Image (tube, helix red, strand yellow):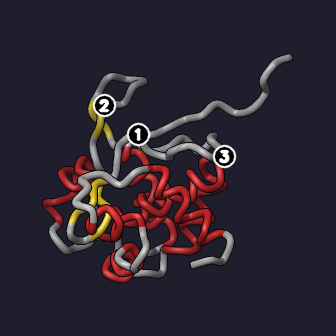
Amino acid sequence: MADNSPPTVIYKPSWVANTFLVRAKKDGVGDVDPLKIQKLVYCLHGWNLAVRGHPAVGERFEAWPHGPVLSSLYHQFKQYDFHRIFGFAKDVDPSSGEEASVYVNPTDAAFYDVFNKVWERYKGFSGPQLSDMTHQPNTPWSYARKNNMQYISDTMIKAHFVSIANGEQ
């Protein structure tokens, strides 16, 4: 019997961040700074784990002092400090082999189903507000920090977002 389910696609963090930046520009959301982009990608990753059962990005989140962080995104956007990001992350475009600003292809309907819901839910929050959400007691970040863990496990992230979906948080 053939498996007709869509393939599991896990993206580079820069592609997902750029997808948020494109959407922010389209929707006139002008407060996306490095802190907010980290938290948006984290929320998408968590909801993707909870809804689709697999990661959205192929990098592990670290438990930094200001919440969950993907170090590759930190390095891509650190030049903006606490200011609005007005450019895009650069990566190698696999179709051309050239450095470019790559984002998730709009044909990935399953990705965009989760992405659109995450965007609508979190776009109105500032970076510090989103960071505060990750700092609540019993979050994956708080557990990792309390236990001196460098990385936040996808298992904990998934369980946390499933509990949000079930109204337990």
Q: Choose between 143 and 68: the one closer to the eye.
A: 143
Q: Which residue is mark 2?
A: 92
Assess whether mark 2 and mark 1 are in contact (beta carbons under 8 angstroms).
Answer: no
Mark 1 or 3, nearer chain start: 1
> Above or below — where is 14 with respect to 28?
above
Instruction: Give the alpha-carbon distance from disc 1 to disc 3, as whole Å.
Output: 17 Å
Q: Under tag 2, what secondary structure?
A: strand
Q: Which residue is mark 1?
A: 58
Number of the front mark, 1 or 3: 1
Image quarter of the N terminus: top right
Mark 3 surroundings within 10 Å by alpha-carbon count, few (fewer than 14), some (14 through 19), many (20 or more): some
Position of residue 12 in the picture relative to residue 167 (left or right): left
Q: Choose between 3 and 40: the one closer to the eye.
A: 3
Q: Amino acid at mark 3?
A: Ala
Mark 2 surroundings within 10 Å by alpha-carbon count, few (fewer than 14), some (14 through 19), many (20 or more): few
Q: Residue furthest top?
A: 1
Q: Residue at x 40, y 79 (%)?
A: 137
Q: Which residue is mark 3?
A: 110
Residue 57 x %, y %: 43, 44
Residue 121 x %, y %: 57, 74
Instruction: Give the alpha-carbon distance from disc 1 to disc 2, as whole Å.
Output: 15 Å
Position of residue 53 in the picture relative to residue 82 (left or right): right
Q: Residue at x 29, y 37 (%)?
A: 91
Residue 94 x %, y %: 39, 25
